[in-house]
Amino acid sequence: MDASWELDLFGKVRRSAEAAQARVDARVGDWHEARVSLAAEVADTYVKYRACALLAETYQSELTSILRTEKAIASLVEAGLRSPSEGALALAGSASTRSSLVLQRAQCDLLVKSLVSLTGIDESGLRELMAAPGTELPQPGALEVESVPAQVLRQRPDLASLERELAATSAEIGVAQADLYPSLSLSGSITVSASDLASSANSWSFGPSLSLPILDGGKRRAAVDSARASYTAALADYRQGVRNVVKEVEQALVNLDSAGRRADDATTAAREYRRNFEATEASWRAGRDSLLTLEEARRTALSAEIQQITLRGDRVAYWIALYKALGGGWLPGTPALPPETMARQRAPIED
C-alpha cells in the first residue's frame, strides 16, 4: 500500500481546488442556460404555430368569400351583364388566395416538425395535445416595467458561467505562481509478503520529498504569464457577456413597449378595413362599384388582419425573449437567485 501527501506550503493545492470547483459551477450554469434556451425555443415555436394557424383560418375564410364572389361573377358574365375581364380577375383572386392558404398550411406543418424535434414527442401525440380546447394564442398583459434591477441579471445562467470561468482562471494564476516555489511532499509505503502460510515479512518506509524549481528554462515563468493572459481573456469575455445581457434585456423591453403601443391601432385598423370591405361588397352587388374596387378593399382588409395576428404573435414572442434575457426560471414576486443557488434549492433532500 502506497500513499503520499503534498504539503500545501504556497496554496497550490487550495487554488487548484478552487479552480476545479469554479469550473464545476460554470458547467452547472451551462446546463441551466441550455434548459432556459430550450424552454424559450419551444415556447417561441409554439406561439408561431398558433399564429400560423390563425393566419391559415383567415386565408380560409377569405377564400370562401372569394369563391362566392367568383361564382356570382361567373353567372353575371354568362348572362352578359359583366365583362370577361371581371371573370378573369375573380379567377385570379381565388387562385392567389388558394396559393397563399397552401403555403400557410405548409408553414404550420413545418413548425409542428420543429416542435416534434424540440420536445421529443411523436407527431400524432403532439397534434393531439395542440388540438385540445383552450389553446388559443395567449394575450399578454400591458407592459408596466420602467426598469430592471441589475440584481435580476445575475440569474442569467450564461453570465454566471462566465463569472465562474473568470474565477477559475484567477485561481489558476495562483497555481502557476505557487509552482515557482519549492514543493514538499510526504510519501510512504507498507509491504506485507509471505512465502508460505507459516511465515510472513512486513516492511514499511516513510519520508519527505523536496522539489526545487531551479533550472527550467523559464517554463514556470511562462506558465504564470499564460495564466494571466487567460484571465485577461476571460475578463474580456465576462464584460462582453454583461454588455450582451443588457442589450438583450433592453431590446426586449423596447419591442414589448412598441408592440403594446401598436396593438390597439392594429385592432382598430383590422376592424375598420373589414367594415369598409363589407360596405364595398354591398355596393358592388348593387352595381355601384367595380370588381376591381371590391378586390382592392378585400386585399386591404386581409392585409390589416394579417398584421394584427402577426403583432399578437410578436407580443407573446417578445415576452418569451424577455424571459430568456432575464435568465428564466423565475416567477412574479420571487427574488432573483443565481443558478447555483436555485439548483441547490431544487435538489432533493437525502436521508
Image: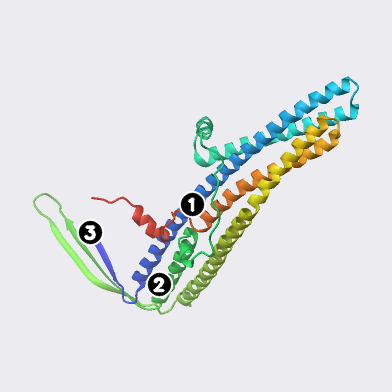
Q: Give how far across and how far down residue 114 sits, in percent.
A: 57, 40
CA neighbours of label 3 inside 10 A, class few (<14), some (14 to 19), many (20+): few
Q: CA distance from mark 1 to mark 2?
A: 34 Å
> Disc 1 and disc 3: Cα gap in Å?
48 Å
- The secondary structure type at the circle numbered 3 is loop
Residue 73 picture quarter: top right
Q: Which residue is mark 1?
A: 36
In this picture, is 114 found above or below 3? Answer: above
Q: Nearer the viewer, residue 177 or 95?
A: 95
Mark 1 Cα-neighbour bin, 10 Å: few <14, some 14–19, many ≥20: many
- Look at 58% across and 37% down and name the residue there: 113
Name the front one of labels 3 and 2. 2
Q: Mark 1 or mark 3, which has the lower sequence index?
A: 3
Amino acid of disc 1: Val
The amino acid type found where label 3 is placed reads Met
Q: For this view, does 240 lie left or right of residue 30?
A: right
Which residue is under mark 2? 175
**In the visual, does 195 lie left or right of 50?**
left
Q: Is residue 43 above or below residue 92?
A: below
Instruction: Single out the mark in the foreground, 1 or 2.
Output: 1
Residue 4: give x, y in percent of width and height.
27, 66
The kind of residue tagged 2 is Val
- The structure residue drawn at horizontal position 34% and vertical position 70%, both measured from the top left corner, is 14
Residue linked to disc 3 = 1
